[in-house]
Amino acid sequence: MKVKSIFKTILLSWLLLFAALAGYAQKTKPSKTRILFLLDASGSMYAKMDNDSRINVAKRLLSKSIDSLSKEKNVEIALRVYGHTSPPNQRNCKDTRLEVPFKANNFDEVKKRIQSITPKGTTLIAHSLLQSAYDFPKEPNTRNVIVLITDGIEECQGDPCAVSEALQSQGVILKPFIIGIGSTVEFRKAFDCVGRYYDANTEQGFDDALKIVISQALNNTTAQVNLLDVFSKPTETNVNMSFYDMNSGLLMYNYMHTINERGNPDTVQLDPVFRYRLVVHTIPPVIKENIDVTPGKHTIIGLDAPQGELAVKVEGLTNYANLEFIVRKQNSPQTLHVQQAATKEKYLVGKYDVEVLCLPRMFFRDVSIDQCSTTTIQLPQPGKLIVNCQLQDYYADIYQMVRNELVWVCKLPVEKRSHILIIQPGDYKIIYRSKGASRASNTFERPFKVTSGQATNILLN
């Protein structure tokens, strides 16, 4: 029975201790890569592969890979094995052990220990992954990689997917690599959620898979992001791009998009271990998911991001100190941006609704933003309304007259006897009465007109 929620609860209490292990922190190149080989030594590893047993092939090719790793700088390895200390009839679901811990220059020790392993018992992947988290020293700025080599699926009612997801989401490890020996379609599906899976049904396939895994574990690769205009040309730039791990949701990199001296989108470095979700922080943002990058190969990532500019200007000399306006997508209630008037901001090409926060508020529907052009909304210069009140206490509201209808503009604060408002030109009314009046008939109206650039004085008595 799967117990994903139980695993998450158990993990939560101690995973925070490993937060410092997020060695793939954005923009900081890890100072060290640690690779933990997690080797299946259950009894089924005696099965045939080509002309030898699976365990012998694994021992031979792992030793070959370790020889290669010993020549790399800033790399440490360790070995954890499961299913090798108890016979199968005991079904020992705790049978996992760190055989060689991480330390410098332990390559020969790991090779020697691998050769001495004798397969015996059962397959306990979830518990082994869980224990693997403790194997990595708590050191910042490292890349922590698990390479799981197995020929069977979970036999101890654990949930490898839940464990792997929790470890990744807390930054303890990178997405595990799984090399599946003698696998089937069902076998591969069982590991899709655990990590990046590679088939190894032959010795050559095993060798190829190990080389790919080691390459991805050690090397970043290059990519460029083409932000395409309406002509499908990569001309858009100067916007931040965030790369997230699709599996854990963790933020991996931020890069400010740049056009280089050759006129091309600049190259960025990405870790090929991950599948990415890319968010380009245009207004509104552009998102692309399930991006794979291949080690040693330059990847071009294209997104449609055509943009134009929007501005609101006020005619003549204005008294607005900090006039702002709200921008929303056409027919959407969600605010995309609050922009200062007299500034320009880029938006994706399309239709928008604009609400200018003046008195009264002004609405502009279906505003069109076009490629490489500036759309300007022009407002008339406001006037100044000065209201003085001789009443001790009162209620007063200002309304605009629109096609013989009253449209509410604002309420005058009763705590003040004098008010100065910057207001758009038009026909208005103040409707008021004394707070102490006992009859509705004591309501008064005072019509007035606001003219651009001029002051209008009203006395309430």
Image (cartoon, rainbow, N blue to C red):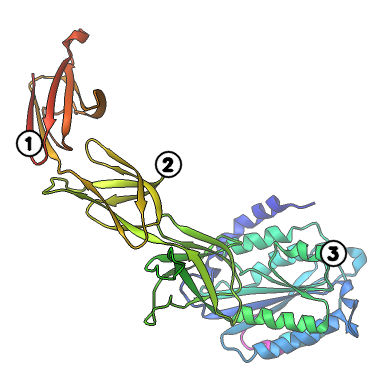
Answer whether residue 103 is magenta in the image: yes
User: In the picture shown, does residue 14 fall above or below 147?
Assistant: above
- For disc 2, the neighbor class at 10 Å (few under 14, some 14 to 19, many from 20) is few
The residue under label 1 is which amino acid type? Ala
Residue that numbered label 3 is attached to: 92
First to last magenta residue range: 102-108
**Residue 26: assigned label:** none
The residue under label 3 is which amino acid type? Asn
User: In the picture shown, does residue 113 fall above or below 317?
Assistant: below
**Is mark 2 in CB contact (under 8 Å) with mark 1?**
no
How much space separates mark 2 and mark 3, taking CA atoms?
A: 62 Å
- Residue nearer the viewer, 66 or 223: 223
Horizontal side, residue 211 vs residue 373: left or right? right
Q: Which residue is located at x 74 percent, y 64 percent?
A: 191
The residue under label 2 is which amino acid type? Asn
Q: Is residue 57 visible?
A: yes
- Residue nearer the viewer, 265 or 158: 265
- SS of the residue at dot 2? loop
**Residue 455: assigned label:** 1
Name the front one of labels 2 and 3. Answer: 2
In what quadrant of the picture does the C terminus appear? top left
Q: Which image quarter: residue 386?
A: top left
How much space separates mark 2 and mark 1, taking CA atoms?
A: 36 Å
| First in sequence: mark 2 vs mark 1 | 2
Where does the image place residue 280, in percent across and percent down from the top left?
Answer: 45, 62
Where does the image place residue 63, in percent across and percent down from the top left?
Answer: 75, 87
Residue that numbered label 2 is attached to: 331
- For disc 1, the neighbor class at 10 Å (few under 14, some 14 to 19, many from 20) is some
How much space separates mark 1 and mark 3, taking CA atoms?
A: 89 Å
